Structures are given as structure tokens and as C-alpha cells.
Amino acid sequence: MIRSRRFGDSGQAFPIYITVVGGLLFLAFAYLAVGQAAANRNGAQTAADAAALAAAQDRRDQLAGAWVKNILEPEKWRDIFDGMADGLTPSCWRAEQLAARNDAGVLSCNAGDFLSYTVEVETNKTVGDSIVPGTETKKSRATATAEIDARCGFELPAEEAEEVLPVLRCKGGIDWEFDPEKPQPVELLPKPEDLFDVHLAD
């Protein structure tokens, strides 16, 4: 009789064991699905950040080029440091390049104002097969905004000193002085990163 009861107890415990193991496996697959989705979202955010920064950096470089071109016309400097200059071209092509390098595509790219770019991307890859229905076709999206900040300020000379160029006072205590009678070579002028900061919006 004792042996019979022990065998019976063992038989009753087996279904419970199977249920517990099955539950643990389900949780493991569920955590895997969550991890896959998180990794895909992180990839999308990385692509969006890189794309927005690339577009903003291209605009920064164009603005710096416009400033060099107009260095002898300080009345145009303010517009340039505010993000406006003649001849600027769209910069979203750079966003598309960087998104592609991060295995994503650009859904939208907009210059929110003259000194920022907002980019939305979607991953090329799906989350992948999992126990969660629909993940095999689900792609992740993310948005990022990059801003351009002028690093320098200046004061226009008085009218009686029109032949004098302003001193460009930049962050870090760096002052740039220019002599209109002795133009400096381009390689000795401030670089784009000296004139403008580019960063992701908070």
C-alpha cells in the first residue's frame, strides 16, 4: 500500500512539473521577444540620432562657408549666424545617407527652423519571429532633432569705421580679428565647428 501511494504521488506531481516547465519556457520566450523589440527600437533611435546630426552638420558647414564667402560684408553676418544665407541647399540627403548606414530609411526630414532638423526613421529589419503575434512584420520607428547653435557673437563697427571688421568673440574665450586689407587664407579662418555647435535636442 505504501509503495502504491508513493507511485500515485509521483504520477500526480508529473503534470505539475510539466506545467511549471512550460510556464518558465513561455516566460523565457516572452523575455526574448521583449529583448528583440528593445534592440530594434534602440537601432531605430541610433539611426534617427545619426541622421538628424548629419543633416544639421551639413547645414552648419554650409553656413560656415557662407560666412567665409561674406567675411568682408559684416552686415550679412547676423543672418548667417541666425541660420539664413543665400545659396543654402537642402541637407536631408545627409540624413538619408546616415540612416541607410544604420540599416534604416528616412520617413520624414524637416528643417523645423533655420537652425534645426527633425528626422523620423524606420528600421529596414523587423523585430522578427516571436511568441508575440505580428512581430514578424513589425518595424521600429524613432524621431530625433538636432540643433545648431552659434558659438560666436560680434558688434558691428560704427558707421565712421565701416572699413573695420568686427571682432568675432566665440565660446571658450577665443577672439578672431580680421584685417580687410590683409585677407587671411581660408585654412587660417575659423572652422565650422569653431563657429557653430551641433547637438541633439534635449
Image (cartoon, grey):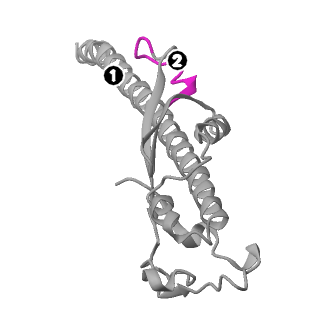
Residue 188, percent across and down? Answer: 72, 80
Q: Is residue 151 above or below residue 22?
A: below
Q: Are marks 1 and 2 in contact (CB under 8 Å)?
A: no
Dot 2: what SS? loop
Circle 1 packing at 10 Å, graded few (<14), some (14-19), many (20+), is: few
Question: Residue tagged by mark 1?
Answer: 23
Q: Earlier in the sequence, mark 1 or mark 2?
A: 1
Q: Residue at x 39, y 25 (%)?
A: 30
Type of amino acid at the residue the image marks with label 1: Gly
Instruction: Return the residue nearer the eye: 29 or 59.
Output: 59
Residue 198, percent across and down? Answer: 50, 59
Dot 1: what SS? helix
Circle 2 packing at 10 Å, graded few (<14), some (14-19), many (20+), is: some
Type of amino acid at the residue the image marks with label 2: Asp
| Segment tinted magenta in the rendering | 121-134
Residue 157 in view, yes or no? no
Q: Quadrant of residue 37?
A: top left
Alpha carbon of mark 1 to alpha carbon of mark 2: how far?
19 Å
Residue 147, percent across and down? Answer: 44, 54
Q: Quadrant of residue 189?
A: bottom right
Task: Judge left or right: residue 125 versus residue 135.
Answer: right
Instruction: Return the residue nearer the eye: 159 or 172.
Output: 159
The mark total stands at 2
User: Looking at the rendered structure, which numbered label has been put on residue 129?
Assistant: 2
- Does residue 126 show up magenta in the picture? yes
Looking at the rendering, in which quadrant would you find the N terminus? top left
Q: Is residue 11 above or below residue 83?
A: above
Q: Is residue 64 above or below residue 37?
A: below
- Outermost residue to the front: 160
Q: Residue at x 51, y 15 (%)?
A: 136
